[in-house]
Image: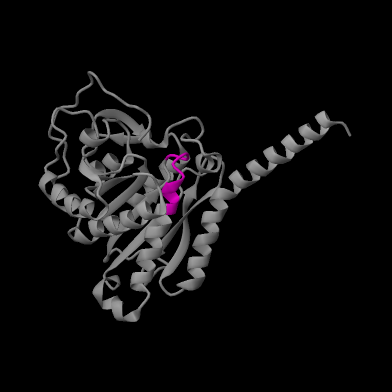
Amino acid sequence: MNRTIKLLLLAVVVFSSTNLLAAERYQEIVNRLNALKGKYPLITHIFSIGTNDDNVPLYAMRVSLTPTEADPNKVAHLVVGTHHGNELAAPQSTMHLLEKVLEKYSSRALFAEGLDDREFVFIPVLNVSGYNAANRHEKGRDPNRDYAGPCHSATGGKLKSIRALTEHVASRLYTGSITIHGYVGALTYPWGVNVGNPQSLDHNTYDRITRNAAAINGYRHGTSTDIVYPVDGAYEDYVYWKHGIWSLLVELKDGSKDDIEKTSDAMYSFLEALDSSPSTKNQLTSACNRAGTLDLMNE
C-alpha cells in the first residue's frame, strides 16, 4: 500500500471518528440525564416536549416532589439551553445548574425550604442537529429568531423544535425562565427588541435582581438591547411578552469550569429572587424602531 493511499484511508478514519463524536454530543447529554434520574429517582422525571424536524425527541428533566406530572399549584421555573448549536458550553452550563438544584433538594431536610411548593424543568439541548454539528443554525434557520414578538407580525415556529417549546411553555404557568448562550459575559433581560426605550415596566425589579446575581459572577447586566444588541424573534423576549414569564438571557463569558460554576450560582440567585407569579406589566410601551436594526448573528 503506497503512502498516498495510506493517507487517504487515515483521512477517512479521522473524518468518520469526528462525525461519530459529533453525533454523540446530544446522546452524551441524554446519558447524563439518565444517570441523574438513577441517582435522584424520587425527585426527577425525564420526558420529551416533542420532536424536532428530524423526529429526534427533545428531552427535558422535571425536578419536583411529584416529578411525573406538572403541578399547576407550584411555582415553576424553566431553563433552556442550546438554541445555538455552536455554543457548546450552553448545555454544560444547563446541566451544571440542574445538578446544583438536585444536590440542594435531594435532602429531605430541605424539602420544606422550597421543593414542596416549586418545581423546575430543564431542557439542556433544544437545537439538537446544530449541537451535534457545532453549527449555530438548525435546518438553515436561526432558532433564536423563530419566535413571535412585539415588534414583528411573524407567528414564529417555522422550526418544529420551536413549536414544541412554545407549546410546552403554554401548557402550564411558569414564573421564571433562563436561556443560556455565549460568549459575552452578561445577564440581560427584556427588552431585546429595537425600541426607543428598551426598559420594560418591570425594569426596576429586573435591575435589582440581576444586579445581585451579577455580583456573584462579575457579569455586566441590563436590557438585552443595551448590553447585547437588538433582535426580533428571540425566546427571551417572547416568553416575557407572551406569558409574563420573568426572563433572563445568560451570555456565558468563556464557558470555562470556573465561569460555569459562578454563573450557576448567579442563575440560581435570579430564580430565588423572583415573585411567585408571572409579571402583569409585560406590555411593550415604547414604539418599535425599524430604522437601523442591527443583528450581528452572534448572540
* Residue reaching furthest to the right: 1
The mark total stands at: 0
* Residue reaching furthest to the bottom: 109
Residue at image x 38%, y 44%? Answer: 254
Does the magenta segment cover residue 109?
A: no
Q: In which quarter of the image is residue 5?
A: top right
Residue 162 position in % (x across, y down): 41, 41
Q: In which quarter of the image is residue 291?
A: top left
Does the magenta segment cover residue 88?
A: yes
Residue 169 position in % (x across, y down): 34, 50
Q: In the rendered structure, which segment of residues is drawn in magenta? A: 84-92
Question: Which corner quadrant holds the C terminus?
Answer: top left
- Residue 78 in the image: above or below residue 129: below
* Residue reaching furthest to the top: 291
Choose between 259 and 79: the one closer to the eye: 259
Q: In this view, does 254 lie to the left or right of 249?
A: right
Residue at image x 37%, y 59%? Answer: 97
Residue at image x 24%, y 74%? Answer: 113
- Residue 109 in the image: above or below residue 233: below
Residue 104 position in % (x across, y down): 33, 71
Q: Which colour scheme is used?
A: one colour
User: Can I make out residue 29 in this image?
Assistant: yes
Question: Which corner quadrant holds the N terminus?
Answer: top right
Choose between 181 and 71: the one closer to the eye: 181
User: Can I make out residue 174 in this image?
Assistant: no
Residue 68 position in % (x across, y down): 43, 67
Q: In this view, does 189 lie to the left or right of 257?
A: left
Residue at image x 13%, y 51%? Answer: 208
Q: In this view, does 69 lie to the left or right of 153?
A: right
